[in-house]
């Protein structure tokens, strides 16, 4: 019950800090207003799916709510979260934005590392695990100076990447 109450208080503070009404958050999260009110008062324990919807409505990391709900254990990043949440010199909105930026950096790093592992294990040559081309070129292009096939099967010179010159 204590965890539910703390989770509810956290959600309420995030909502109020973002200046979102209970009614608006219920619409954004797709949860009824009475149910959301009960969550905020610590009377209900929401599922992971509901927490994810609330996090999306608040524009915060769902992982943050999972940790507050006791669904996930906080990974070694507690120092950053604790420092930001405990900083009285920041408004609730500033704390929320700062934690969102921090989470986005962590997620981007994890995606990049996962992409490197896929390529290192013999993934598709020249394509990252997310389907994007690696830096420095597009997939399907020939090495600079070599012709590449066009849609009609004829050869065309490969663009050097420099501005100006002959454009065709």
Image: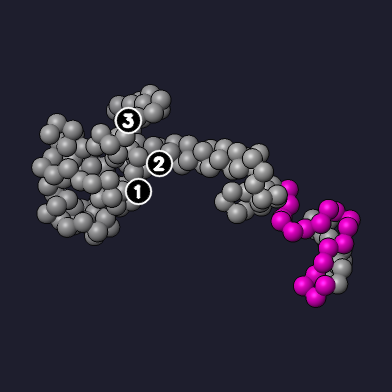
Q: Is residue 146 magenta?
A: yes
Residue at label 1?
Answer: 59
Q: Residues within 10 Å of mark 2 (few under 14, many from 20)?
A: some
Could you tell me which secondary element the residue under label 1 belongs to?
A: loop
- What residue is at 27 percent from the left and 45 percent from the top? 48
Q: CA distance from mark 3 to mark 2?
A: 18 Å
Is 25 or 113 nearer to us in this picture?
113
Residue 59, position in %: x, y?
35, 48
Q: Residue furthest front?
A: 122
Q: Position of residue 18 (x, y in %)?
A: 29, 46
In percent of width and height, residue 138 lies at 71, 55
Marks 2/1 in contact by CB < 8 Å: the verdict is yes
Judge depth for marks 1 and 3 and give the one in front: 3
The numbered dot on residue 100 is: 2
Would residue 57 be visible to someone looking at this image?
yes
Q: Which residues are magenta?
A: 136-153
| In the foreground, 16 or 46 | 46
Q: Is residue 82 left or right of residue 69?
A: right
Eyeballing the image, is 105 above or below 38? above
Tell me the SS state at disc 2. helix
Residue sitting farthest toward the bottom: 152
Snapshot quadrant of residue 116: top right
Is residue 85 shown in magenta?
no
Q: Which residue is mark 3?
A: 73
Q: Residue at x 33, y 51 (%)?
A: 56
Categorize mark 3 by other alpha carbons within 10 Å: few (<14), some (14-19), many (20+).
Answer: few
Residue 141, above or below 134: below
| Residue toward you, 119 or 23 | 119
């Amino acid at each position: 019950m204590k965890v539910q109450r703390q989770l509810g208080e956290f959600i309420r503070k995030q909502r109020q800090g973002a200046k979102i009404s209970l009614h608006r958050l219920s619409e954004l999260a797709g949860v009824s207003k009475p149910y959301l009110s009960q969550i905020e008062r610590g009377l209900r324990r929401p599922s992971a799916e509901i927490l994810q919807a609330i996090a999306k409505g608040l524009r915060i990391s769902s992982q943050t709510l999972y940790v507050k709900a006791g669904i996930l254990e906080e990974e070694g990043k507690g120092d950053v979260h604790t420092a930001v949440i405990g900083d009285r010199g920041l408004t609730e909105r500033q704390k929320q934005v700062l934690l969102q930026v921090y989470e986005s950096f962590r997620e981007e790093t994890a995606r990049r590392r996962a992409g490197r592992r896929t390529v290192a294990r013999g993934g598709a040559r020249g394509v990252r695990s997310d389907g994007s081309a690696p830096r420095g070129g597009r997939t399907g292009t020939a090495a600079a100076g070599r012709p590449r096939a066009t849609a009609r099967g004829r050869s065309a010179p490969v663009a050097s990447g420099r501005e100006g010159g002959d454009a065709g």
